[in-house]
Every structure is written in structure tokens, then in C-alpha cells.
Image: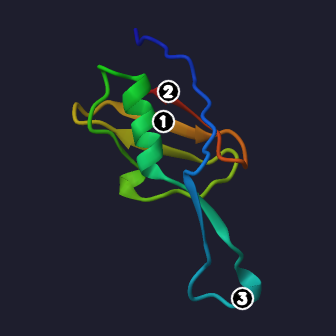
Amino acid sequence: MKVALILTLFALAGCTQTISGSGLPAEDIGPRVLISHVAVEQVIQQQGYPIYNNVICNGGHDPQISKGTTFACVDSAEHLILVTITSDAGNFAWSPQ
């Protein structure tokens, strides 16, 4: 039986960036706001210490912030962690799988 961790919400003050799309016509793209995968990794390592170490999220890429978006993280012991963006402001919750 897995021990359930309380899902943690984290406000991302200073942990986001805005980028513009690339090769598409301007009317088909808009700015995208990304969440820092490094910030998410640090939160999981701090809150999950000593279980989670050397966490890598989303393959080392910053995912787009959009409520309901999910992505996976894994640590050096190959623990799988699911992260869900819970608001368009960039709050997220994480849980072991």
C-alpha cells in the first residue's frame, strides 16, 4: 500500500516565463506561460525529503501552464511522481504514483 502524501499547492511567484510561439502565423499563436521544471523539482525534493532526490520533471523541459495539464517527474530511485497544474495561475499538486 502506498503512503498517500497530501497534495500540495504551490504559488509560483517568480517561477514562470512567457515565450512566443515559433513558425506559425501570428494569428495562430499567442504567448505561452511556462512553469519552471526546476522550481517544481525543488518543491518535490524539499517536501518529499528524504524520499525524493535528484528529481527530473517533464524530461527537463518547462511545461505550459494550463489548468488540468499533467506531467511526470522521476527521481534517482525511479519513483514516479505525477504533477497536475491546478490553476491557470500556475498552482500545482504532486503525488507519488
**In the foreground, 14 or 67:** 14
State the colouring used for the structure image: rainbow
Rate crowding at label 3 as few (under 14), some (14 to 19) or many (20 or more) other CA atoms within 10 Å. few
Q: Secondary structure at mark 1?
A: strand
Q: Position of residue 52 (x, y in %)?
A: 31, 27
Rate crowding at label 1 as few (under 14), some (14 to 19) or many (20 or more) other CA atoms within 10 Å. some
The numbered mark, 2 or 3, whose residue comes first in the sequence reads 3
Residue 6, quarter of the rendered image: top right
Q: Amino acid at mark 2?
A: Ser
Could you tell me which quadrant the N terminus lies in?
A: top left
The numbered mark, 1 or 3, whose residue comes first in the sequence reads 3
Residue 97 shown left or right of residue 86 in the figure: left
Report the residue that reaches farthest toward the right.
Answer: 27
Give the residue drawn at x 73%, y 49%: 88
Dot 2 corresponds to which residue? 95
Q: Position of residue 71 (x, y in %)?
A: 50, 46
For marks 2 and 3, give the CA distance.
37 Å
The numbered mark, 1 or 2, whose residue comes first in the sequence reads 1
Q: Amino acid at mark 3?
A: Ala
Q: Nearer the viewer, mark 1 or mark 3?
A: 3
Mark linked to residue 82: 1
Q: Position of residue 47 (x, y in %)?
A: 43, 24
Q: Secondary structure at mark 2?
A: strand
Mark linked to residue 46: none
Dot 3 corresponds to which residue? 26
Kindly indicate whether the residue at mark 2 contacts the one at mark 1 (C-beta within 8 angstroms). yes
Q: Secondary structure at mark 3?
A: helix
Residue 11, quarter of the rendered image: top right
